[in-house]
Amino acid sequence: GVSTIAVGGRRVELVVGCQETGEHLVYVEEARRLIEEENVDAVMGGSSVVTRDVAHRYPGSIFVSTFWDEQEVTLRRPAANLFRFTPDYAQQEAGLGAYAYNTLGWRRASIVAGVGNPGWAGAAAFTAEFCSLGGTVAATAYAASGGESEAVARALAARPDGVATFLTAFDSQGPILLPLAAKLDSPRRLLLWGQSFLDPTLLARLGARLDG
């Protein structure tokens, strides 16, 4: 159903390629095919730092990263022909630390994060912002599979004013969020990162514990 279109009076042909998120070799092969065989002028899409490295190999082509990613895509060894318009994981947390400090009134916070780039970057961004305002991150617990209860226990043992979580669909969110919501006496003491809201079944299980 994808057809040729006109943008600003110029004919634009859309050539489709397929990739698999996390399968970097697939992206490399598809990008090479699109440039060398289909002779495209620009490659849209891609995820991870591999997009940058391929852009370095084809300086005459334009690359646009369209999936949120690590800072490394454009932070170090940037390619002049690579552009991105999506925030990285740390940028997605902008304002959350200030919200916890100024609006919720937290002064001591705990963090529970997944053991992946979203967790590391989210925790670092929240910590930088929250602490710059005078807050203290009393505990940061990374929850690997099977270690969810230990992470929750460590976060609560620090006696924080609230707990900020940075979890994705690849983490076991239920064993973390359900006990946190049950043991914190107010929903204003729990912050959930946006990707937690992608699972409607989890939200249904949390129910009224999220009110407020």
Image (cartoon, helix red, strand yellow):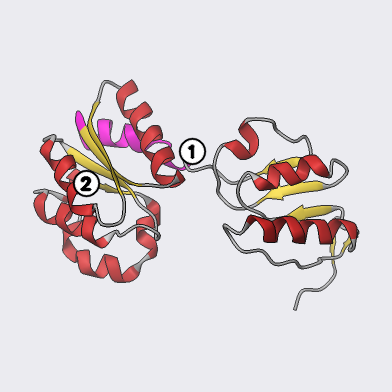
The kind of residue tagged 1 is Gln
Give whichever of 175, 127 is nearer the camera.
175
Give whichever of 69, 7 is nearer the camera.
69
Q: Position of residue 210 (x, y in %)?
A: 21, 57
Q: Position of residue 60 (x, y in %)?
A: 88, 43
In the picture, residue 163 is in which quadrant?
top left
Q: Position of residue 80 (x, y in %)?
A: 77, 34
Query: Which residues are drawn in magenta?
Result: 92-108
Q: Position of residue 51 (x, y in %)?
A: 69, 47
Q: Residue furthest bottom?
A: 1
Is 132 in the magenta?
Answer: no
Is 107 in the magenta?
Answer: yes
The kind of residue tagged 2 is Ala
- Gap between marks 1 and 2, in whole Å? 24 Å
* 126 is higher (above) or lower (below) than 41: above
**In the rendered view of the protein, which quadrant contains the N terminus?**
bottom right
Residue that numbered label 1 is attached to:
91
Q: Count the marks: how many?
A: 2
Residue at disc 1, secondary structure: helix
Mark 1 / mark 2, whichever is N-terminal: 1
Residue that numbered label 2 is attached to:
151
Query: In the figure, is residue 172 to the left or right of 20?
Result: left
Q: Residues within 10 Å of mark 2 (few under 14, many from 20)?
A: many
The residue at the point 64 percent across, 52 percent down is 66
Query: In the figure, is residue 102 to the left or right of 196?
Result: left
Whether residue 31 is visible: yes
